Image (cartoon, coloured by chain):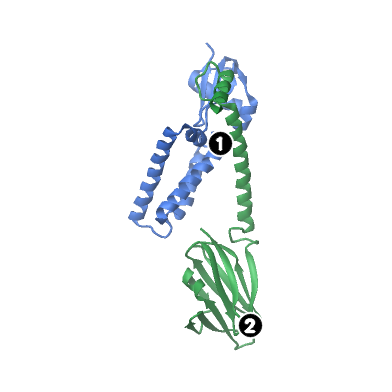
Amino acid sequence: MGFLIRAAVVYLGLTMLFRVAGKRTLAQITPFDLVLLLIISETVQQALLADDQSVTNALLLVIALIGMDILLSVLKQRWRWLDRVLDDRPLVIVRDGQPLRDRMNQERVSEDDVMASARLHQGIRTMDEIAYAVLESDGHISVIPRR
Amino acid sequence: MVKEVEMATRTRNTPALDIDESLPLQERSWRIRNAAWLAMVLVLGAGVTGLFGRGPLAAAEVTVGPGVTLEYDRWARKRAPLLLRFRAATSPGDTLRIHVGWPLIRSVRVLDIEPHPEGSAADPAGVEYRFSLQPPAGVDFLIQPESAGRLRFSIRAGSAAPVPLTLLIWP
């Protein structure tokens, strides 16, 4: 029973922490973000395993974590509000070539981030060529060019 | 009602885009996020100051017998080492007797006792350890709580009355 409680506490704790960290936190993983993820996994490892380092305990924990992930995805599909609460929603950050700065500031997105995505995915050269830029719920920026 | 507000916002903001955008809910999400950031700062502050053990706020000292004090952390963590440090004003060759109640002994793992006791004896209330000390005298019990929660026990030195103590063990 202890392993299930530890897995649930760690899973829910990490879910909430990454949710409040914002959309952009790990959207584009830099080498440092990767190191940070490894450090976080090392940090919670001890608390998860406690003093039981057996293969049985490890398998039970992995099954519990994956099971919780499946359960949460089923619940999010059934109750849309839960999906919105946990995964956030898309947000328009550029409209008709005009950056919506309040929204961008709240989400820590710069015009450079938008233009980088515009160049990469659409070959767009200037902000004026953008009809909409949308910060998706997973933190990526979608750019729709003007026609 | 909420759905109507959402739809109205959705239509007004981005008529050309079929996305599930809602500015009122987004703003509420930002407010909750800012409150969560503040809470994270407060938790870190509590950690630094010792609310979860190992900090100045956790440090406590109590007299457990004539000339004998105990320094300890009133807040500690499960499976983390916790030091109980006894300081005694003794003369060369004096014997210090420390009696520890069963609730503590049964709830922790004793990692080390320094110096090693010359002897110990169990009774219905706990275990009495005997030490032969040279000044400046002190005895360190390094223990490790094995369960979380409130831990009530008593300690006494020599023939003094037992001193009730309470530790809060964080998970």
Q: Which residue is mark 1?
A: A22
In this view, the residue farthest toward the front is: B1
Q: Is residue A131 above or below residue A7?
A: above
Tag 1: amino acid: Gly
Query: Chain B colour?
Result: green
Using the image, tell me which numbered label, if any, was put on residue B135. Answer: 2
Callout 2 secondary element: loop
Q: Are both tags, 1 and 2, on one chain?
A: no
Where is residue A108, by image quadrant? top right
Residue drawn at x 57%, y 15% as measured from the top left? A129
Q: Answer yes or no: is residue B81 visible.
A: yes
Q: Callout 1: residue from which chain?
A: A
Please state the horizontal and vertical placement of residue A79, each as a whole percent of the image: 45, 34
Give the residue displayed 35% in from the left and 51% down from the top: A60
Task: Name the residue: 62% across, 39% down.
Answer: B34
Crowding at label 1, few (<14), some or many (≥20) Cα neighbours within 10 Å? many
Residue B145 lies, in percent from the top left, at 50, 66
Please identify which colour was used for chain A in the image: blue
Q: Residue at x 48, y 21 (%)?
A: A121
Indicate which disc residue A36 carries: none
Q: Position of residue A118 (x, y in %)?
A: 53, 21
Instruction: Tell me if I can see residue A35 in this picture.
Output: no
Q: Amino acid at mark 2?
A: Pro
Question: Quick check: B85 above or below A34?
Answer: below
Helix, strand or loop for disc 1: loop
- Please tell me which residue lies in front, A113 or B57: B57
Residue depth check, mark 1 versus mark 2: number of the one nearer the observer: 1
